[in-house]
Every structure is written in C-alpha cells, then in structure tokens.
Amino acid sequence: MPDAQAPAKDPSRLPHEKGFHISWDQIHRDSRALAWRLDGYGPDDGAWRAVVAITRGGMAPAMIVARELDIRTVDTISVKSYDHQDQSEARVLKSPDADIMGDGTGILIVDDLVDSGRTLELVRALYPKAHFATVYAKPKGRPQVDTFITEVSQDTWIFFPWDMALQYVEPYRGKD
C-alpha cells in the first residue's frame, strides 16, 4: 500500500490487536463522502481536471471519487515506501502523464490512507499545486493531506478489504 501504515510499535502487540477493519461497503461509503467533500472545490469553476490514484491503495477510492464527481481523466502514480511491513525510503516507480500533471494545478491526488506522510510528501514535492485527499489519516501524516474523512490513532492498524480474504474458521469448541 502506498504510504500504508507502519506496524505497531510494541513488539509484543500484534497489528490486529488495535485493528480497524474496513469492509468494501465502508470504503465505498467513505470514498463517496470524500467525493462529496471535494465537490465544487476544484480550481476550474469547482471542477477538477483529473484524478491521480496513488497505487495501490488509492485506486478504489480514486475510482469512486472520479465516478461521483464525473471526472473522466484518471491516472496513477506508483510509489514504493514499504517492503512488506518494513518502511523504507519512498521512491516513484511510475509517474502519471506529464502533460496532464504540470505543477498539479487542478489535479486531485487520492490515496486510501496517510500514515507517516512520506509518500504524500514525495508526491507533493513533484506536484506542489495538487490537492491531496485521503479517506483515512493518522496524526503524523495529516499535515500532508488537504482533505480526509476519518482520523485514526497512529498505532491503529487498518485492515483494508483488498488485503483480506474470507475463510472458514474452526469453532473454538466442538466441530459441529
């Protein structure tokens, strides 16, 4: 996940012990709420020129925002800042179309979450006039976001639906 959350600091505590589970329905509702919050705030008579999703976590929210706001130009920027759950130096793997981007004016950059803010800091340096929106925000990364929907504590681990799978679990007692 671009700018995904850092693992819990306490090594004796597993990430799911302070987990925030997001369903597909919830990410859809929250992404629509993000779109509604952004509606009419673009620099072109309230409209946005394009949506850029930060891959991979920003793709579902960006798609929903683009649909809700009737934005047809959608692109991606791919930033790697994690190797599994270990945070590393953020670097761009794939950039959006340079002709569309310019300095970012009129561009809405969307991600699922801002955690430490490193990913958004890197992207903001490339497109300083873009508007940065995330569905969820943690305190350390909040200064990098212009618009968000829900703030969670820094030590909360968010479980997104694209990271989860439904599976059968044996009952605690008995087999039937």
Image: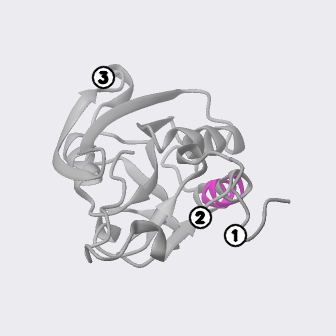
Which is nearer the eye, 110 or 79?
79
The total of numbered circles placed on residues is 3
Q: How busy is the neighbourhood of tag 2: few (under 14 within 10 Å), some, or many (20 plus)?
A: few
**Helix, strand or loop for the magenta stretch, by majority:** helix
The residue to which callout 3 is attached is 98
Residue 172 is tagged as 1
Q: Quadrant of residue 67?
A: top right
Rounded to the nearest angstrom, the CA distance separating label 3 from label 2 is 36 Å
Residue 36 is tagged as none
Whether the magenta-drawn stretch holds residue 27 is answered as no
The residue to which callout 2 is attached is 21
Q: Residue furthest left?
A: 89
Tell me residue 42's x, y (percent).
Answer: 52, 50
Q: Is residue 123 above or below residue 95?
A: below
Q: Is residue 127 above or below residue 151?
A: above
Q: Secondary structure at mark 1?
A: loop
Tell me residue 60's x, y (percent).
Answer: 58, 41
